[in-house]
């Protein structure tokens, strides 16, 4: 079975500071990895995804994530956050057929002025 | 990018009534659509997967007769919560997978907040 762990439920950070949101996964087979962002009372928006190739993936809004197979991690980073980045971020994995997505419990990023 | 809409965005109903939620893919054909449920401060849990023209596949623990799913066309899937009770109050989110060029990504709708009184 697959599972996703987001250890930090909340991450407070000051504007223009760097941030890292952690994601670890467990799977006995190869998976594909995704990060989604959810603004209040809205659905999920895709930030970035790792399917294959370079382990460093760049997404929208200046976010990037690095796939580390040995550590089964896919941490999300941004060098300088903005107030508008305040939202909840979900890490997810799926298998080869891209059907069932397994989501982490989410990390609320709170960017303070 | 691909757009998925949901209607209504919010619905309040009395206990015992049925509520229908629509999920539409606006600019692509969705061969597969998914329905998720999100409880407060929790992550999304997949309820069911629906393929156009066939019966939905429900996840373990999800009542088929309570959550009726219909995927009548390549752009529309509906979720009907029958005989709703307060414990059905939740945020329901649909997603759709593009059967064409972006088969690896699910595009999510904005969600429907259901409150059952």
Image (tube, helix red, strand yellow):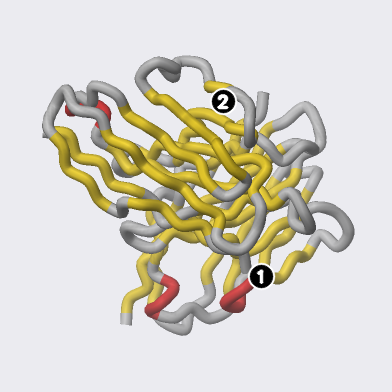
Q: Residue B56 carries which label?
A: 2
Answer left or right for B80 relative to B96: left
**Residue at 19% across / 27% down in the picture?**
B17
Please identify the quadrant where the N terminus of chain B is shown. bottom right
Q: Which of A24 and B63 is in front in this view?
A: B63
Circle 1 residue: A59
Question: Residue A17, percent across and down?
Answer: 48, 79
Residue at 51% across / 16% down in the picture? Answer: B60
Q: Quick one: B79 or A85, which is closer to the camera?
A: B79
Describe residue B85's horizontal placement relative to residue B79 as left or right. left
Question: Where does the image place residue B84, in percent across and percent down from the top left?
Answer: 23, 26
Q: Residue B58, which numbered label?
A: none
**Position of the C terminus of chain B by quadrant:** top left
Neighbours of disc 1 within 10 Å: few (<14), some (14-19), many (20+) = some
Chain bearing tag 1 is: A
- Element assignment for label 1: loop
> What residue sits 52% from the left and 57% below the top?
B4
Q: Is residue B8 above or below residue B92?
A: below
Image mark count: 2
Q: Quadrant of residue B71?
A: top right
| Tags 1 and 2 both on a single chain | no
Q: Nearer the viewer, residue A100 or B51?
A: B51
Residues packed near mark 2 inside 10 Å, few (<14), some (14 to 19) or many (20 plus):
many
The subunit carrying tag 2 is B
Q: Nearer the viewer, mark 1 or mark 2?
A: 2
Question: Hey, which residue is sitting farthest right in the picture?
Answer: A53
Q: Residues at badges 1 and 2 in contact (C-beta under 8 Å)?
A: no
């Amino acid at each position: 079975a697959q599972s996703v762990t987001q250890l930090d439920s909340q991450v407070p950070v000051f504007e223009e500071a760097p941030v890292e949101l952690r994601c670890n996964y467990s799977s006995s087979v190869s998976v594909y990895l995704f990060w989604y962002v959810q603004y209040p009372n809205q659905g999920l928006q895709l930030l970035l995804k790792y399917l294959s190739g370079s382990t460093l993936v760049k997404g929208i809004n200046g976010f990037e994530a690095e796939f580390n197979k040995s550590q089964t991690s896919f941490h999300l980073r941004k060098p300088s956050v903005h107030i508008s980045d305040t939202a909840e971020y979900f890490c997810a994995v799926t298998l080869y057929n891209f059907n069932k997505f397994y989501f982490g419990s989410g990390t609320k990023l709170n960017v303070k002025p | 990018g691909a757009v998925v809409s949901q209607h209504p965005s919010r619905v309040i109903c009395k206990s015992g009534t049925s509520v229908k939620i629509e999920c539409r893919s606006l600019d692509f054909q969705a061969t597969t659509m998914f329905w998720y449920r999100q409880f407060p401060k929790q992550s999304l849990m997949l309820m069911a997967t629906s393929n156009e023209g066939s019966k939905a596949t429900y996840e373990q623990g999800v009542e088929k007769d309570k959550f009726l799913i219909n995927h009548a066309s390549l752009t529309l899937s509906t979720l009907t919560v029958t005989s709703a009770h307060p414990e059905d109050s939740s945020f329901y989110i649909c997603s759709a997978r593009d059967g064409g060029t972006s088969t690896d990504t699910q595009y999510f709708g904005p969600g429907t907040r259901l409150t059952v009184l």
